[in-house]
Amino acid sequence: MKINGETKLIGFFGSTFRTSKMYVMYNSVFENLRLNYVYVPFVVEDVKKGVEAMRNLGIHAVGVTIPYKVSIVKYLDELDADAKKIGAVNAVINVNGKLIGSNTDGHGGVRALKEKTVIKGKKVILLGAGGAARALAFAVKDESGELTILNRTVDEAEQLAKAVGCKFDGLEKILDLIPTTNILINSTSVGMAPEINQSLVNEKLLHKGLTVMDIVSNPRETKLLREAKKAGCQIVFADRMLLWQGVLKFELYTGTKPPIKIMEKQLQITNL
């Protein structure tokens, strides 16, 4: 990789800047396609100042993750249609000095799900009502899934359901709904390391014919996915969502379709 005065800089804002897998993935593809870009981490403690630096340094784009997906919005000039309805961004593009926020999380999740199942007309339970849930809820709705949002705090589920146009209820309702559900998505952090022996779903509720996706990537095989596989469910790992949202961001950053196989290799993932 050669860096010169024409190199376009893409940065990363977020708490996982030390451990993100995106650097090796993107830079490998830039080199493979001979694109004059470089992807680097930024240590951002004040998101407003981070956005100012993006403007003043002419940074081409940044990837955004927790805790800045929502707080960065007010400092941007414009949001695309997805980011506007979701109210959060995971990428910002600098278009001639105008900073435009985008969100590929939901569509990345849907792409991962569609590797295993059809969403249209299927009954879908989404666990959680946070930032990731918002992106997934709108994307599932766009695919004509029959969505129900379940959350411990029912008010939060109701607010999101009203925005999306779907059903909602408390988490305990899963007992009644899951027998006829086709797709189950955990969009909460339950099961994430170090609390790897936690799950919101009793394993006795899991059944064949159910496709289960967990957005928790550490560990790769969460307790929910482990028990779902044992029950004969199709499972979708979080790294498939990570891959596809990354593919969509790459296209936003460069206007070029990336080689998927190289990205998969760099993330060291398989579609089991």
Image (cartoon, grey):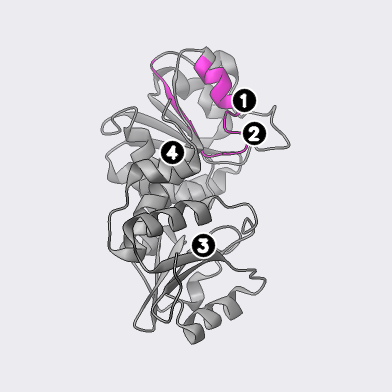
Question: At label 2, which amino acid type do we have?
Answer: Gly
Gap between marks 4 and 3 measured at Cα: 18 Å
Q: Position of residue 11 (x, y in %)?
A: 51, 68
Q: Position of residue 27 (x, y in %)?
A: 45, 58
Gap between marks 3 and 2 measured at Cα: 23 Å
Query: For the N terminus, which image quadrant?
Result: bottom left
Gap between marks 1 and 4 measured at Cα: 17 Å
Image quadrant where residue 52 sits: bottom right
Gap between marks 2 and 4 measured at Cα: 18 Å
Question: What residue is at 37 percent from the left and 51 percent from the top?
Answer: 247
Question: At label 1, which amino acid type do we have?
Answer: Lys
Which numbered tag is attached to residue 223?
1
Q: Which is more N-terminal, label 3 or label 4?
A: 3
Q: Which is more N-terminal, label 1 or label 3?
A: 3
Indicate whether residue 212 is drawn in magenta.
yes
Mark 3, residue position: 64
Mark 2 touches mark 1? (CB < 8 Å): yes
